[in-house]
Image (cartoon, rainbow, N blue to C red):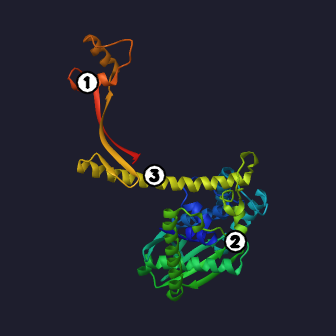
Amino acid sequence: MFSFSQIKSYLQCPKRYEFSYLGDFEFEEKNSLFLLQGNILHEALRRLYQRISFFSLPSETELIKYATEKREEILPQHDFFDPQAETVQSTLAEMIHLLKSYYQQHHPFSADSTIALEQKLFSKLGTHTFSATVDRIAKRGQTFIIYDYKTNKKLTPEIEASHKEQALLYAGIVLENYQKYFQNLEIRIEYLYLQKTTSRIADQAEIQPVQQHYLALADEISSKKDAFKELNDPAIFPTNKGEPCKRCPFMDLCPAFSSLPSELETSSLTAKSIQHLAQEYLAVHNSVKSLEQEKQTLKEQLEQYLQDSDYQRIFGNDYQISFSLKDNRTIKDEAALRQLLAEKGLLDESKTLDKNKVKKLFEAGVIPSDLIEEKVVTSLLQKKG
């Protein structure tokens, strides 16, 4: 399954995609104050339209109070990274001003009725499933409207084109899920900070090329994932060094920002070389993990074959593999066993319980089965031929 964020991560930097979705380690995103405030704005609008759907329009004061309290709850949970060095106080005033402007512009919020909020939808393209979370879906007459809220402060032609492509992808998914309920589908991208709205009627002639583009990207990523799993070659997902790198949680591991001398002396290690070592360790770890899984599968197949064939040994060109079934007995109650052996005059107090002696006494019926637990263990031994 692919989401827009996964595709976006891959396009931004294939190496980041590898670290994010193919690694098996935990990481924390570097949160900017600006990004966190964008999330809070989304949550405030979600809450606003949720209340409206329940026929309980909050006042402007209630909306700002909710957003402010949510902000006070979220911000202390993050050590946010802020490239623009904006202060917490100034961005709070900015958020309040923005919500007031939005509220006054759209009040009394009767232009359309909300169908869904933060709706996660799925679509099948080729052999891949795509998911999308739409900020808001509304209905006005016979028209459904997709609302996508953006918190960009700057809007380059490249960013705007990316937003349009994302909206068209979402439109295709909404069409697949809801098409029987409307005649027209409108796409509205609302730039909250810029107080700008772009609107267009979704056209299948525009949607189809976007879907084909994302399908091709999904095929490309899937092919690389298979190759990476097989070869574990870090070059399969190359780095794309640029401005977004300073917000990347994997910067310390990225080969674009670390180097390792050919002859390593631990006394000369720097922070950067340690980071590179961590990357190399991760690659080896993933390789070992994959080989261990393969080894276990081969072991199980060989054991089954040898057991079914009643063989004890098979040979390769360089190695021989011996196979045996071992009886492994475990004493359930050592105190009870010692008492039994003492009563029968078979216990030597100066020695620990001898496993071979216990085995023989058990096989002779001297020790009852309720004191011994039997396990059959298969053993596969590899030796030089």
- Badge 1 marks a residue whose secondary structure is helix
Seen from the viewer's position, the closer of residues 67 and 283 is 283
Corner quadrant of residue 355: top left
Q: Give the foreground label among 1 and 3.
A: 1
Q: Position of residue 368 (x, y in %)?
A: 23, 23
Would you say the residues marked 1 and 3 are in contact, meaning their CB atoms lie under 8 Å apart? no
Is residue 364 toward the left or the right of residue 253 in the image? left
Callout 3 amino acid: Glu
Residue wearing tag 1: 360
Residue wearing tag 2: 152
Give the label on residue 249, or none. none
Seen from the viewer's position, the closer of residues 349 and 188 is 349
Residue wearing tag 3: 292
Q: Give the foreground label among 2 and 1.
A: 1
Corner quadrant of residue 189: bottom right
Is residue 201 toward the left or the right of residue 107 in the image? left
Callout 1 amino acid: Lys
Let me know if residue 244 appears in the view: yes
